[in-house]
Image: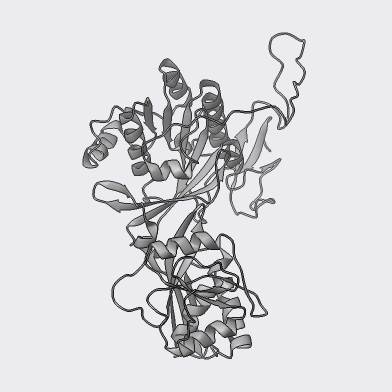
């Protein structure tokens, strides 16, 4: 029988249950319910403080002028870009990523750069000792930066220490290691993570300090702890990187002060993370002629156009069931494109293995990549290489139509800047400079152009 005031909280989704069960009824996770004692029943309001007379709501109108929020530049341009042009004072940012991807390295560089620019910065770690942080800073050449360091996990001590000085930027690494003496649950539990995040967000708003919280991720690449934390903070950033590749991508998932899906690109080296100002050059292969099965896609990541290479290999199947493997793209989109190529273009993949890869390990999600994937697959199946100076973009429908996509002018400008002179895409593209436009309305027309090496005249 449960104790008075005790509930069973799921450590995966945060749902509270009155009694223990082997499987959480909310998210169906097994053995995730843990008993936690609450100081008051769930949903009960805290007693009123001070005078019994309550204040009413003060309503305002949409017509009132609101000044733009001030920005603090950290000196790391890629980080500031993802944050919307700089860090907003009083904001709370949650940064998640796989273990070992470089979250602590990135934030230590951000703190050091901001401190060198005159901002008061504090780096508080619950996972490393101060000597370990100093050693990493020395290896990265940041030992001279005036960053204040601390190693602490007690939330009360952290808040008391932060209130003694005036800070502009505070990094907490990580939120799962903190614990509050107001709750009996252990560190890392849903109750402790929610309580610690709530107190730090309130501290950020009250003191006007930008607070960056590091969050661990689960095996499903979701930030561990209750999802309410992502609603409490102002921005959620994801730090991504594939093992074996030197680059890292900082992606904005949520941002109340800027655009979402913005990316910043870094390259991991011996001295830490280096900013990549031209990501397209990083993801492209500029050596020699383009082989059959390769197509350069002109995509958009946030506000930035990025060129990346799609690589496809179509080979006879050695087994009874052909294999379909895809890296960096949605497997469902691959199945759809293969079906359209078979039904609308007459290309057969029924007895062939199909492999599709996005070069460099970058993950592409926008529908504008359909035509690039289809062009790479058709190029491999027909054993006809696309021109070295050709880029491809366009959305493919189930009927085989090639549809226009957004921001085609930005894609063309980025392609022209990197030396591309031909474009295979949907009809209706406005001419840009000396780029030759090969506009198509049907996927079959694009496959025919690839097979016949017909790319039209310059615009």
In the drawing, does residue 27 fall left or right of residue 93?
A: right
**Which residue occupies the foreground of this view, 102 or 416?**
416
**Which residue occupies the foreground of this view, 437 or 369?**
437
**Which residue occupies the foreground of this view, 235 or 424?**
424
In the drawing, does residue 232 fall left or right of residue 155?
A: right
**Which residue occupies the foreground of this view, 451 or 429?**
429
Q: How is the image coloured?
A: one colour
- 167 versus 9 height, above or below: above
Q: Could you tell me how many numbered marks the image carries? A: 0
- 399 versus 286 height, above or below: below
If the image is split into quadrants, where does the N terminus sit?
top right
Where does residue 446 sit, x and y in percent of width and height? 54, 82
Asked whether residue 34 is in view, the answer is yes
Identify the residue at horizontal 31%, vertical 52% (top origin). 268
Identify the residue at horizontal 33%, vertical 43% (top origin). 105
Asked whether residue 322 is in view, the answer is no
Where does residue 407 sit, x and y in percent of width and height? 56, 59
Where does residue 278 sit, x and y in percent of width and height? 37, 55
Identify the residue at horizontal 56%, vertical 71% (top origin). 394
- 404 versus 197 height, above or below: below
For residue 430, which quarter of the picture?
bottom right
Where does residue 27 sit, x and y in percent of width and height? 65, 53
């Amino acid at each position: 029988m449960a104790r008075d005031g005790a509930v069973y909280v799921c450590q995966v989704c945060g749902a509270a249950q009155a009694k223990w069960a082997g499987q959480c009824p909310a998210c169906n996770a097994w053995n995730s319910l843990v008993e936690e004692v609450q100081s008051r029943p769930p949903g009960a309001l805290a007693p009123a403080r001070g005078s019994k007379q309550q204040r009413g709501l003060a309503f305002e109108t949409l017509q009132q002028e609101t000044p733009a929020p001030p920005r603090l530049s950290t000196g790391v341009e890629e980080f500031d870009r993802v944050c919307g042009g700089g860090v907003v004072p009083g904001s709370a940012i949650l940064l998640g990523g796989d273990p070992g991807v470089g979250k602590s390295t990135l934030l230590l560089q951000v703190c050091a750069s901001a401190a060198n620019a005159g901002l008061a910065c504090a780096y508080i770690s619950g996972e490393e000792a101060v000597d370990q942080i100093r050693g990493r800073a020395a290896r990265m050449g940041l030992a001279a930066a005036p960053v204040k360091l601390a190693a602490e996990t007690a939330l009360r001590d952290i808040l008391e220490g932060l209130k003694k000085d005036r800070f502009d930027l505070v990094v907490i690494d990580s939120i799962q290691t903190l614990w509050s003496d107001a709750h009996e649950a252990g560190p890392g539990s849903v109750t402790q993570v929610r309580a610690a995040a709530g107190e730090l967000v309130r501290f950020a708003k009250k003191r006007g300090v930008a607070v960056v919280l590091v969050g661990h991720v689960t095996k499903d690449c979701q930030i561990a702890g209750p999802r309410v934390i992502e609603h409490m903070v102002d921005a959620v950033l994801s730090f991504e990187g594939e093992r074996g590749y030197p680059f890292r991508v900082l992606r904005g998932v949520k941002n109340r002060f800027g655009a979402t899906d913005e990316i910043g690109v870094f390259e991991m080296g011996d001295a830490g993370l280096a900013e990549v100002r031209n990501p397209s050059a990083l993801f492209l292969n500029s050596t020699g002629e383009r082989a059959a099965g390769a197509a350069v896609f002109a995509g958009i990541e946030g506000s930035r156009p990025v060129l990346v290479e799609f690589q496809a290999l179509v080979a006879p199947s050695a087994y009874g069931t052909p294999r379909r493997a895809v890296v960096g793209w949605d497997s469902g989109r691959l199945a759809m494109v293969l079906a359209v190529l078979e039904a609308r273009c007459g290309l057969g993949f029924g007895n062939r293995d199909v492999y599709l890869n996005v070069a460099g390990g970058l993950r592409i999600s926008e529908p504008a990549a359909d035509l690039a994937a289809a062009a790479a697959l058709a190029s491999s199946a027909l054993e006809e290489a696309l021109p070295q100076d050709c880029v491809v973009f366009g959305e493919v429908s189930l009927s085989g139509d090639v549809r226009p996509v957004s921001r085609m002018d930005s894609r063309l400008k980025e392609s022209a800047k990197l030396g591309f002179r031909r474009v295979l895409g949907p009809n209706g593209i406005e001419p840009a400079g000396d780029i030759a436009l090969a506009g198509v309305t049907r996927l079959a027309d694009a496959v025919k152009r690839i097979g016949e090496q017909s790319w039209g005249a310059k615009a």
